[in-house]
Amino acid sequence: MKAYVFPGQGAQFPGMGKDIYENSEVAKQLFDQANNILGFSITEIMFGEDAEALKQTKVTQPAIFLHSVILAKVLGDSFTPSMVAGHSLGEFSALVAAGYLSFEDGLKLVSKRAISMQKACEKNPSTMAAVLGLENKIVEDICSEIDEIVVPANYNCPGQLVISGSVKGINIACEKLTKAGARRSLKLPVGGAFHSPLMEDARDELETAINSTNFTEGICPIYQNVTASAITNPVHIKENLKTQLTSAVMWTQTMQEMIADGLTSVIEVGPGKVLQGLFKKVDRQLQTESAIL
């Protein structure tokens, strides 16, 4: 069984998507449509060389979404998933690629998500940190003992967990986790505590947008971040998506569940190869590749 997976924030790079734009009329039309929907020329930023402009959350998230979704659209009949999943932002890409959301609705939701997350970050100075080499339970227990907001945010692969919370909470957690035997506790260069209670305002805004968006039947199951299990019911998908911003990304559990359900090969659609590397950490025998035109 073949899974198509979609990367999240952090996979962006200057020049992203330009080759797709230049080699496909379908891609060109979709990128031009995206500029109109967003009200600014995102292609100018994506195809340019200004890495700093690309790092703005309101640009980064739509840029990665567009790269992934348009590549999936251009694949046409060769896009044949038995299952799909996306890491954080990538879940929106997966939903559009698998037919649960239209291209326009997906892009509008991603743009709303990015802007509302940026606002939440500015309201509550916060951060994230990667913890390497500790069991999940130890990290979870230490986070729960700290009298600040600090929670597991991304279960990326066995032995690699990202925590999220207040600046003070993350500092305390990193110190305690290092003492507990973590190989590394490394603060990440991000602007906020994604997938934590500090995203509650952004979650509220996004929920309003999701409620007014039409979800339809898709072409295959999607393994959602908050459940790590195969979902096909659009009503359930919609509900799960509403809680994504304040819940942990259960990516380790998602990969394990996909493998248990018969996964044999993984195709990463979009910029970078991060997700392929994570799958290899779970099962070295898995066949992985990047989607290409």
Image (tube, grey):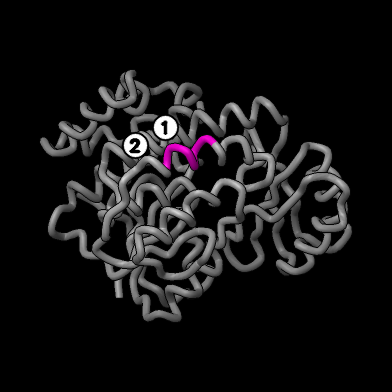
Q: Does the magenta-highlighted stretch encompass residue 6?
A: no
Q: Tag 1, which secondary structure?
A: helix
Q: Is residue 24 left or right of residue 153?
A: left
The relative height of residue 242 versus residue 281 in the rendered view (above or below) is above
What is the three-letter code of the residue carrying label 1? Ser
For the residue carrying disc 2, how many other residues have a C-alpha within 10 Å: few (<14), some (14-19), or many (20+)?
Answer: many
Q: Is residue 171 left or right of residue 68?
A: right
What is the three-letter code of the residue carrying label 2? Leu
Which percent across, then down, holds residue 79? 20, 59
Which percent across, then down, holds residue 285? 42, 77
- How far apart marks 2 and 1 lie (CA) works out to 6 Å
Near-viewer residue (9 or 220):
220
The relative height of residue 156 versus residue 16 in the rendered view (above or below) is below
Which percent across, then down, holds residue 223? 43, 65
Q: Residue furthest top?
A: 40
Q: Residue at x 72, y 35 (%)?
A: 126
Which quarter of the picture shows residue 81?
bottom left
In magenta, the rendered stretch is 205-210
Q: Residue at x 82, y 50 (%)?
A: 173
For residue 107, the mark is 2
Q: Which residue is mark 1?
A: 111
Q: Does the magenta-highlighted stretch encompass residue 208?
A: yes
Q: CB under 8 Å between callouts 2 and 1?
A: yes
